[in-house]
Image (cartoon, rainbow, N blue to C red):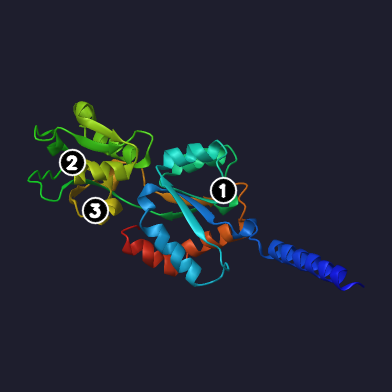
Amino acid sequence: MHPVVKAIFKAIFAEIFLLVSSMIITPSASAEPLLIMAASSLTNVLPEVARAWKAQGAQGSQEVSFSFESTSRLAQQITAGAPGDVFFSADRAWMDQVEKVGKIDKETRVTLLSNRIVLVVSADSSFAPTSAAALLDPHLKHLALAGEAVPAGRFARAALKTNGVLAKLQDRIVNAENVRGALLWVARKEAEAGIVFETDARIEPGVKTAFVFPESSHPKIEYSASVIHGTKHPRASRLFLEFCKSAAAKKLFVAAGFR
C-alpha cells in the first residue's frame, strides 16, 4: 500500500477509535443526578443525609440534586408529570393525593419523621406570648404563616382554630409561599410572630421560640417519602430511601430536631 494511502487509513482509524471511545465513556442516563423533590423544611438536613449515603458507596458514583419547595407545590408538579426520583412530603394528605393519581410507587412509600409547630418571634423581640390566646394582643399586627395548602400552614391554622383564635386573627395573617418564607419574615421583623416547624426555628438565628403548640391541637405531623413513578433511577432511588431508614440517617434527622 502506498505510504500516503496508508497514512490516510491510519488517520481515519484513529478518528473512528476516538469516536467509539467517547461514546463508551459518555455518561448514560444512570449518571444523571438523582433528583430529590422535598419539603422546604428538609432543606438543611437532606443534603447531609445524601452526603452520608454517598460516603458509604453502595450506590456507586450517583450524584444527588434537590428541589426544595412547599409540599403542596411539589405534589402539584409531580401530578402534572414533572420528572423526579424521590418525593419527601411533610404531610400525609399530599402524599395520599399523589399516590391516588398513580404518580408514586406506593410499595416504596414509608413514613420517616415527625415534627412540631411552634410560635416564633424575632430574636430580640420583647413580645413574648406563651399561648395562642396571647396572640390576640394588639402588639401583634402581622402573623406569618405558610399558605393554607402548605402543610405547616394547614397545621398552624388547625392549632389556632382548636384554641379558638383563628377567626379573630384572620385580618392579621400574612401568607408565605412556604414555611421558610414565613420564618424569614419574622427574622427580618416584617411580621411580629410566625408559626413554623420546630426544626425551622432551630436553624434561624434571627428568631426565638415563644412556645410549642400541643400536638393534640392539630393533625399528626408525618413526613413520608416514596419513589416517584417513572424514575430514571429505580435502584438508586430505593437505595436512598433505604438509607433514610438507617441508624446513620436517623442520627442526622434527630440532630436536626426531627422525631
Location of residue 16 (image quadrant)? bottom right
x and y, in percent, of residue 164 in the image: 21, 32
Q: Which of 71 and 222 is in front in this view?
A: 71
Q: Which of 197 and 28 is in front in this view?
A: 28
Q: Residue at x 25, y 32 (%)?
A: 174
Q: Which amino acid does label 3 sit on?
A: Glu
Identify the image quadrant of residue 160: top left
Amino acid bearing label 2: Ala
Q: Distance between the residues labelled 1 and 2?
A: 36 Å
> Residue at left 12%, top 38%?
134
Q: Identify residue type, mark 1.
A: Ile
Q: Which of marks 3 and 2 is nearer the N terminus?
A: 2
Figure quadrant of residue 23: bottom right
* 3D distance between C-alphas at marks 3 and 1: 31 Å
Residue 195, visible in the rendered structure: no
For disc 1, the neighbor class at 10 Å (few under 14, some 14 to 19, many from 20) is many
Residue lying at the far left in this picture: please name it.
126
Question: Which residue has dot 3 on it?
Answer: 204
Residue 121, numbered circle? none
Q: Which of marks 1 and 2 is nearer the N terminus?
A: 2
| Whole-percent x, y for residue 58 in the image | 56, 70
Q: Which mark is residue 228?
A: 1
Image quadrant containing the N terminus: bottom right
Which secondary structure, mark 2?
A: strand
Q: Is residue 1 left or right of residue 208?
A: right
On-image quarter of the C terminus: bottom left
Which residue in the structure is indicated by mark 2?
193
